[in-house]
Image (cartoon, grey):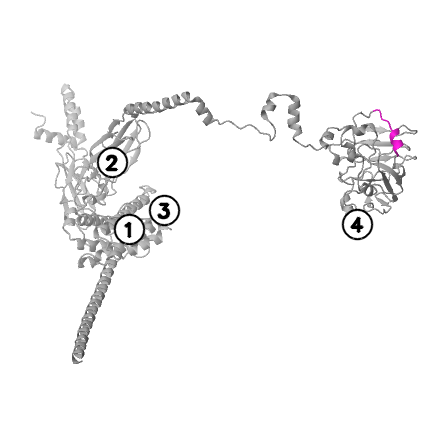
Amino acid sequence: MSLLAPSYLRDILKRCSSSETLRSNKQLFHSIEADLITLLLLLSVRLCASPPGKPVLIGCRSPEKETFTCWWEPGFNGGLPTRHRLFYEKEGSEEVHECPDYWSAGKNSCFFGKEQTSIWVEYSLTVVAFNALGNTSSDLFKIDDVMKIVKPYTPENVTVLVNDTANTPYLCVSWNHPPKVDTKSGWTTIKYELRVQKEDNKPEIFHPNKKNSFKVYNVDPGATYTVDMRCQLDQSSWSEWSTASVVKIPNYFQNEKPFWILVSIFSVIPLLATICIVVLKRKFVKQWLLPPVPGPKIRGVDVQLLKSGRAEDVINALIGNQNFPPAAAWMDQTEEYLLVSDSNDWLLTDPYISQKKKSLVIPAGVQLEIQCRTSAPAQSDCENAEVGKDGKVEPDHLAQTKESVLNVAAPSVSSGSKEAASGNAAGPTGYVDIQQHKGTQGAGPNAAQWDYSWVKEVNGETIFILKNEDAAAGLDVPGWEENTAADYSRVKEVNGDDVVLLQKHDSADSSCKKKEDRSAEWTNQKAKSRHGSDCGKGACLQIAGNGYVDSVPRFYVE
Amino acid sequence: MQAKMEQGKRKGKVAKQKETKTDQRLRKETEMAQSRTSGGKLFMAVVYMLATCRAVPINDLLNRASERSDEMYSLSTGLTKDLASHMSPLSWPAMERPALCHTSVLPTPNDKEQTLQVSESALMSLVRSLLQAWAEPLVILSNHASTLPHPARINISNKIQNLQDYSKRLGDGLDILSGKMGPEAQVVSILPYHGGTDLGHDRNSKLQKFNFLLSCFRRDSHKIDSFLKVLRCRAAKMQPELC
């Protein structure tokens, strides 16, 4: 008896249905046959047919917007041959249709052809599994719109060529449209996406506008590139990536070798030519490149004479042609010395020599000559003060006679005469500078001309300048007397700390009233002079610390 | 004397004749000149009109219209994705279509063969009707977009405003285009929207209705796009790259 005989199976089924039978069977057969029966029973349980399991619809896909295919997964078949059938409903119609084609797309699939496919229409699908015992239907599968399940195939024949004939190499990618898609009627619009990856870098995505070809320009020579493509229909899902093509760009410089050889040859020849020219025509080139700088030329001076080098000739040539002002010789003579006459009670209470005017207290009888350092004749500001008997410097005693001057003998006086060019011929600087040495007069050829003047007499407010006939050079300074008369003025009254009233002079520029503060700085004498006094040209008076009004040179320090 | 008089008369006659001849010639010449000038003016006017009022060829117009509709369709697709993105499938109401779209009453071709059999004017009429049918619902959508209980509502609101803009521009272009096609293209079917101005009261119903409207719009915009592209390909026989 075959195990699969229908009667036997029916028996088994009956037994399967009731558990009591099983137990009684067990009890009955305790022999080896029991084992066999058990085995048979087990087998029978296995062969228990049941209605089929529930199939599951996996998904659907339309590759070209004209047809679509759906797949399902069958459930447990229940031990019996099962048959699956797919039913669908279209939107707007109650009619139930069955799948037209179960075989074209393979097993467990349903292919909807062009006649059955409608775009923009909702489909409701179910798969029913049938077997001898019954049927089971799957859950309802809804396709909202066939457009939502459109997914094209990959583009075909994707080929990549390296084009390096030009200076810049590029990749030329060409492809065909995916299979089965209609490109003639405008029913579908295909968009392509191209992916280029250089070795292991991040891939670059391109969207070609053309249908069949695309050029990729930014490629590096010697690198390896992987290119693949995919496409899309009308904003649908993207297809899979095509099979990748791998290309290697040949190295650029190897191709360019002969070019560079030619370039180097053609650049070497002119270089050699220029070197030869430069070497052969050294002098000319040197002259052209570095033209000689013309030497200095002095008018009237013969260069050859200078070159011969004789000193006298040189000096004559240089100096004889020029007329230097005589003052130049005096410019170097800057020596400062103090001449003090030899007399009693000589006391220098406050001697200081500076370039500026400072007050000086000299005991009586002392003739003090201060010769300040001078850099130029005009800049001298020396002061002469004669100390009176009381220790005050009084203008009365300022006058120094020739003899008193001659009495003065300062050991420190150098032979070289130095005239403090305090007063000069230039104008009334307000200085009366007594020449101390006769001998020193003639040191400079023109020195004594403007440096000194003899004071004849000081009479009260006025100082009379002595015209020195003996002076070698003559100290004729016209107009000197008038100006020097303004140098000193008598203090009339001291008013408190800062006011000194001077006695008015007849001369033009004598009376200047100033504030005086011994410790304070000098006020602006120019400003004072504007008040009406005639301290125009600088022959203003400056009050010394002890009430003596000194004349001030043209410039002063505040 | 008489002979002289006669001679004089003859001369006068001859002179007169000459005069008349010259007159005539002058007149003719002036007439010719006038006609020439007037003809020239007319010619110039015609040329000027042609130059300034140069008509854009239909191919160009269809191309532009297709580009607009493509933009509109991609925008609506993105919009439906945005709407579905932030919602989990559980909280998202099932993608049930509660009713048919209000444009379902309009019979349109549903596959390639049917579409290729429809005439151009009829296709144009369908496209215009569909576009016109969405003018009002888009307004409703944009009104409710800013208050939609959805995290991406600002983005959605902006996109819907863009959609309105595209729709308007495309409608204007199609009006011009249909003027160059047959009389059938001028027929625009009215498809009224009866869904009311309100989206619903509770959150779920609001979202559901919004989603439903958007999916209908997406579908219709794709129809418009497909039909226009078919028209473009048909009109551009000399330019296969447009198909």
Q: Is residue A403 magenta?
A: yes
Identify which residue is drawn at 64% across, 21% down: A310
Q: Which residue is mark 1?
A: B213
Q: Is residue A510 left or right of residue A199?
A: right
Name the chain under label 2: A
Q: Earlier in the sequence, mark 4 or mark 2?
A: 2
Q: Quadrant of the N terminus of chain B?
A: bottom left
Which marked residue is nearer to the observer: mark 3 or mark 2? 2
Q: Up-down: is A84 above or below A93?
A: above
Q: Amino acid at mark 2?
A: Phe
* Residue B109, percent from left and from top: 17, 50
Observer-side mark, 4 or 2, equals 4
Q: Quadrant of the C terminus of chain B?
A: top left
Point out the stretch of residues depicted in magenta.
Answer: A401-411
> Callout 2 environment at 10 Å: few (<14), some (14 to 19), or many (20+)?
some
- Three-letter amino acid code of the residue under disc 4: Gly
Query: Disc 4 vs disc 3: which is toward the camera?
Result: 4
Q: Secondary structure at mark 4?
A: loop
Q: Is residue B186 above or below residue A130?
A: below
Name the residue tied to disc 2: A214
**Circle 4 sits on which residue?**
A532
